Image (spheres, rainbow, N blue to C red):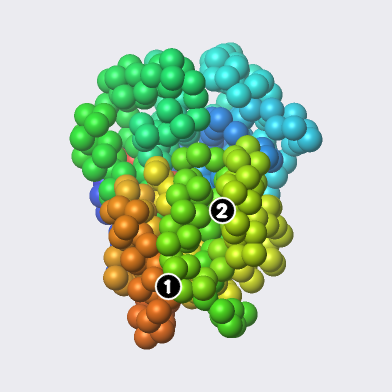
Amino acid sequence: MWMPITMRRKLKGLPLGAEPANAAEASNDLPTVAQIGALAADAGIGRVHILAWRDLADVEAGGSENHASRVAELWALAGVEVTMRTSYAAGASTSGTRDGYRVIRKAGRYMIFPRAIMAEMSGRHGPRDALIEIWNGVPFLSPLWARGPRLIWLHHLHTEMWPLVLPTRLARVGQLLEARVAPPLYRRSKVVTLGESSKVTMLERLGFKAENVHVVPPGVDAKFAPGAPKSPEPSVLAVGRLMPPKAFDKLIDAMLRVREVCPAQLTIIGEGYARDGLAKLIAGVGAQSWCKLLGKVDDHTLVSQYQSAWIVASCSVSEGWGMTLTEAAACGTPAVATKIPGHIDAVRDDETGLMAGSPAEFVAALVRILHDKELRERLAASAQQRAKSLTWERTAFDNMAVLASCVPRSRHA
């Protein structure tokens, strides 16, 4: 990645390269908020606009929204004026400030795209030095209208998700837009994704050039750390939005088989429109005594659940990373996860958890960890150590580094 000499001098000693995030685990020299500010200032980036489908105020907010919020918060703390334009969220104000950055919530889930574009083109959001487009299934098509430095955040493709969340015809439209219509427009754009496996998928399916796709893993909040003791009885925890792509029904099916040899408990944390269906499934298989739907919980409860669980599990069919897996890792809890892009980066097989390529492998992995205390403790220790390298300061710094590389050299002079 090109960087002006003055910037390199200011950041002497900090690892940065074509894939700057990879250096986080190779060095104990993690960036500070002040260094994020110096990087932005040297590139002439004082005002950043972020276009997002939804933000953390939305009842269905998940990993993508948490990622955007944490980066925006640290950029704002570093002195960058950040404006996030997103859709209306029930119960939230249409405009205001969150964690130091400005949020504008107007238009519905579908009208956010044309209305945000028109607002940017007309300057209603105010002047900007750079633009972040979050491509979360449906793109804002910024290559067609946005001038100046511009960066795309694309966490993963939604190929497998479309049929699970939309009627057949609309799902086909979504797949066509994401896989065929939009990619040619973005092939000259710089893209940041969360893991190497997602990058490979984008190169293969979207035709992006390797040099334009940068990998920057997400961070883990400091609140996630070991503390409470493990539960006295075998326990499995799953965290996420209750929606079909997360495949909680498959996890319940897997636990039915696990309980044939191990009396493990399953706890599911999260809310979503699939809750009623999951409750009926639990009742239908007679699992009320060992499978609990806790709904949305406060931070203290979430951390405590991560700490006390023996395993965190995910049967998800599509992920950009799987932030709940590394949150649990920071609390000293290993993972069992489906072997899909995203999970492959969040979990290191047989080091921080076990990966499963089929339902049978998933059940076997759960049973293996539940029955083997030495394995469980080894995976937990490695998971916790690996999670220490995943800081939001590193994520914010590396994203700013890629954004700074989008600035024409003449602006650095």
Give 238 or 28, whichever is nearer the viewer: 238
- Name the side, left or right, on which 121 lies relative to 283: left
Whether residue 234 can be seen here:
yes
Callout 2: 10 Å neighbours few (<14), some, many (20+)?
Answer: few
| Coordinates of residue 255 in the picture (x, y in percent) | 47, 61
Give 55 or 35, whichever is nearer the viewer: 55
Which numbered disc, 2 or 1, marks the residue that appears first in the sequence? 1
| Coordinates of residue 351 in the picture (x, y in percent) | 31, 72
Residue at (44%, 68%) from the top-left corner? 260
Any mark on residue 261, and which?
1
Residue at (61%, 30%) from the top-left corner? 86
CA gap, disc 2 and disc 1: 17 Å
For the residue marked with disc 2, what is the amino acid? Val
Any mark on residue 129, and which?
none
Q: Secondary structure at mark 1?
A: loop
Please state, as top left, top right, bottom left or bottom right, where the C terminus lies in the image: top left
| Coordinates of residue 106 in the picture (x, y in percent) | 68, 24
Residue ID for mark 2: 285
Q: Secondary structure at mark 2?
A: loop
Give 165 or 265, whichever is nearer the viewer: 265
Q: Is residue 309 above or below residue 67?
A: below
| Coordinates of residue 128 in the picture (x, y in percent) | 54, 29
Q: Is residue 76 above or below residue 383?
A: above
Callout 1: 10 Å neighbours few (<14), some, many (20+)?
Answer: few
For the residue marked with disc 1, what is the amino acid? Val
Residue at (65%, 55%) from the top-left corner? 293
